[in-house]
Amino acid sequence: MDIPQFSFEIRRMKIAEKSESVPMTKPSIEALLQSLRFNQIDARHDNIKKAHRKTCKWIIKRAEYLDWLNPNKVDEHHGFLWIKGKPGAGKSTLMKFILSNARRSMKDKIIISFFFNARGEQLEKSTTGMYRSLLLQILQQLPTLHSALDPALVLGIGENHEWNIEALRALFEQTVESLGSFSVVVFIDALDECDESEIRAMVSSFKSLGDLSAAEGISFQVCLASRHYPHITMPKKIELVLEGQEGHEQDIISYLDSELEIGDSKLAQEVRSQIKEKASGVFMWVVLVAGILQQKYDQGRIHTLKQTLREIPGDLHELFRDILTRDDVNKDELLLCIQWVLFARNPLKPEQLYFAIRSHAECSICKWDRDEIGEAAIGNFILSSSKGLAEVTRVKKDPTVQFIHESVRDFLLKENGLRVILETGGDIGAEIHDQLKRCCYKYTQSYTEENGLPESDSKDHLSEACVVADLEFPFLRYAVQNVLYHANAAEEGHISQTKFLETFQLARWIQHNNVFQDKDVRRHTTSASLLYLLAEYGFGSLIESHQQNQSCFDIEGERYGAPILAAMAAGIRPTIWRLLKREIREEPATSHLHSLCNEYDIEKKVKHGLGRNFKFNPKSGLLYYVLRDGDLIAASVAIASSKPYTQINFRTSRGETPFSVANQHSHDISVPFRFLLENGADVENGDELRRTPLCLAAANGNTAAVGLLLEKGANIEHTCSGGKTPLMYAAAEGTEECMRLLLSGGASVAVTDNRLQTALFGAVCSQIESEAKVHLLIGQGVDVSATDNDGYTALTWSLKQGKATKSIVQMLLSRGDTVKRTDLLGRTPLMFALNNDLSIMKQLIDEGGDINAIDTRGQSALLLAVRFKLEGHARILIDSGACTDISDTYNQRTALSYAVSTQYYDTHTAPPGQPDIALSFHGHYLPPSIAEALLVQGAKVDKDDINGRTPLSHAADIGGSADFVSLLLSHGATKFLLSHGADVHHADNSGRTPLSYAVDHNYMATKLLLDHGADVHHADNSGRTPLSYVASSGHIHAVHIARLLLDRGAIPDKVDKAEKTALSYATTDEMRDLLSKYP
């Protein structure tokens, strides 16, 4: 290693230190916030009707609510209030009221909320969405928390803003723990509308935060609302049950008095009273019954109100049944509406649902005429078709259709209400999906060139067609993109789709689907196979029913090449498994491939699979990508298929082999290595660096793989392109156990690579078991004094790399190496110790290292330590008596000269062949105490360098410090210094004085020099004065420095040898104005 390693190692440590404390940048913060946002983030909250003006107010006076707010009772509840009630009891309306009240009354607190929505998109009903929403709210309201966030949080946030729940939970916990004096109140509604396992994990995390907050005085309060089930234990909380609450019962009375407009007669009062009693606290039941009775009253059937109320079931679910089966008016529309709301892949927009229902009855595609069919008409149609049980959400952006309450869905699915309505006994879900598939397919078949289908697949035509389709045929996008989804779901329910697939017009569907792909890379050619598309989209059940005799390993002209790779790119392992099962269906029953596929783990998580961004390259071959995905069972089936691109002894254009791919993408390489060897892979197949499998296994440290390869006859002394052997790889990167295995197999410790380095050189720098490896090699007789091409021994090599340890240094010295050794450039171990801990330098000095040794460039260890700003090392050398006046050969600068400035020679000023060694350290200083210690040790204050410059000249120059200038100037007045002080008038070879350099940038240094008698009129060899230099500097403080010089008598009109004055050099209007005012 050359001298540059000094600067490299130090820079690496500096960067590491900085990365631990540097705050997140504004762009990274914005990236984080953007990754947390998602559509419909407030949809559930916005869709909940505002509480009636006379209802819900009781809650803020309840003792439970007041105790929750009381900071003196935090130890009793740890900040948790949990509201529970029956389905339909009005919990969400109550929560919306409490949240609204909190925002008005708790101005000193940060209010954040999330309302789960089982009828919405995936993020609306998962804790992933909850954490994203809560984090976004709190980070937007408290920008001061940004500085506490870890910059690593935004690493890995992809284009699609995908988060995993563990990272979100950790980020939320970190945010709460960083609140300090801020108070946060969290409202979370409808916990029962999220998966139970997710809620249990969330409650556990919140409980820990509550415990921490109570213990450390962090103000963190949480109000939860849910049904009574599932029950989740939380010892420290306040629980409030709605049923039986006087205020809740009064809310029902207030609602009926206001909304049930049937007069104030005795009959009306009796009806209201009976409703309240029959409701059993279920507000949703009250709302529905009030609507039914209001309709009777409006029809003049006042006399039937009591009878109607008696006939209405008191149970909410039975009421739903009654509403849905009361008559057969528009029954087909009712059934279709319910089926679409229940089983659509994602919630439909109102116009989508409208045309989806119409598509069932009409044979041709329906174009949306907005003048004829307005949004209000569509809303009324949905209300009528659903008999009031579905509604359009109230969100402004992208409203969708959902049931009026989650209890409607519960009735239809959990209570078998849908089965009763449809009068079927089969797999009702499969039957419905089959029906919806037919709706989608019928709709798409009518979409032709006449209706806007593009005549070509050009990007412009596709984009234009997409806009037209979304405007005129709102259901078309859903129908095209989900016809196969519904067919797959029907097949899962054992409704055969074989005939459907046989008649499926694939090329036309591809044309349709390409219209709605916003990125060209997601589009397909019309020659893509159905199997490929089913694999990419993860429709495993349809794969099994697909009858065409096609292999999943056949290469196509699509993005991912083969169907199996498309499935791997999507990361859907059940789909891969079904492809493999389909592939081997014609294999004999005795084939081992059947048992392999039966062992396939469809739940296995692949951390570093192919991913959707990869693109198939025929030059790499199919097996290469299968191995990259780490799927050995798929690889087995691929090899057995004998298809093109599945040859096991491949070598890509980049020199990758099966073994190198497995080595890079496997956790335990012994498994894929054994697989490859059993399937005929060449044991000596080298990669682009001629590394054989044994070299790779040795570097990996996998003993099992090394042993297996040795059993197969791998060449133990094979040399790669750098001359390294398997033993060298094991020594540098592997384990001691691998080394022992290789040594027992006959590996030689005396073999050298192209640099003449033995395995010992790698062992001394290894990050794994380095001391044990060195001890092992010494025990095998390795020569510790052997030198490489540059004259390094293992000792100097370890020091040079900054990897030396005290025990390794001691082992090597005790076995024959010496601290007096030098490399080809005369550098000693003590010089290389600068790359290591201070303890290593002390150890080498104690072992007799020559602190004043000089290399071929005239540099001593002290001079190098000062140049590279290594304060600790410099102090040790100074305290050990190192000579202070040694000067290097290329600049003739001393340690003092380097200590007082940050200037180094670079590639433009260094002698030929001298490398750049410290460009990355401009701007770093040593403390003045180092320069002072050098002066105490006898450093010459006015020793000039090759350019005639003294330490004072360098201290005053750009990058210098006024502290150093002051120290050097005060040298003569200090009783313990031997010199007569720094000479402020000393001119270098170009005639410039320290003042001439100081004016370029440093106001304080300029003032110090002037105060010590520096000549303001001195002209250098070109006739330029300090004022001339500051006029041309353009520095931010240039005008102030110029004024200082003028006040000390500088002459602005003085002409230099180029016949120019200071005014002629002025670069700013402000400078010209200043100089013009002085005679």
Image (cartoon, rainbow, N blue to C red):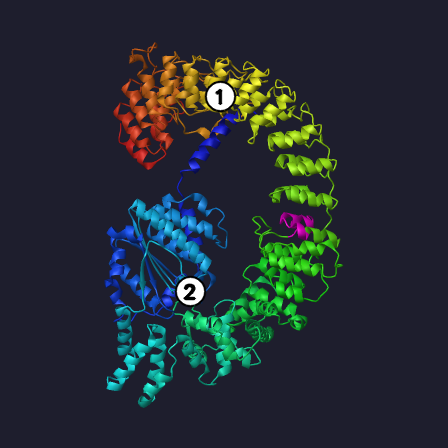
Please say whether residue 618 is one of the residues in the magenta stretch. Answer: yes
Instruction: Read off the magenta span.
Output: 616-634
Q: Is residue 286 magenta?
A: no
Q: Which mark is residue 840?
A: 1
Q: Position of residue 1003 (x, y in %)?
A: 31, 27
Quarter of the figure that contains the N terminus: top right
Coordinates of residue 784 in the picture (x, y in percent): 61, 19
Which residue position is annotated with label 2?
117
Residue 736 seen in render: yes
In the displayed structure image, the side of residue 592 where residue 226 appears, left or right = left
Q: Is residue 116 visible?
A: no
Crowd class of label 2 (few under 14; some 14 to 19; many from 20; radius 10 Å): many
Mark 2 and mark 1: Cα distance apart in space: 63 Å
Q: Nearer the viewer, residue 495 or 130?
A: 495
- Residue at 52% from the left image edge and 73% from the top image edge: 473
Q: Amino acid at mark 1?
A: Ile
Q: Quadrant of residue 737?
A: top right
Residue at 31% in and 48% down: 214
Q: Is residue 504 above or below residue 861?
A: below
What residue lies at 25% left-to-right and 25% top-to-bottom?
Answer: 1047
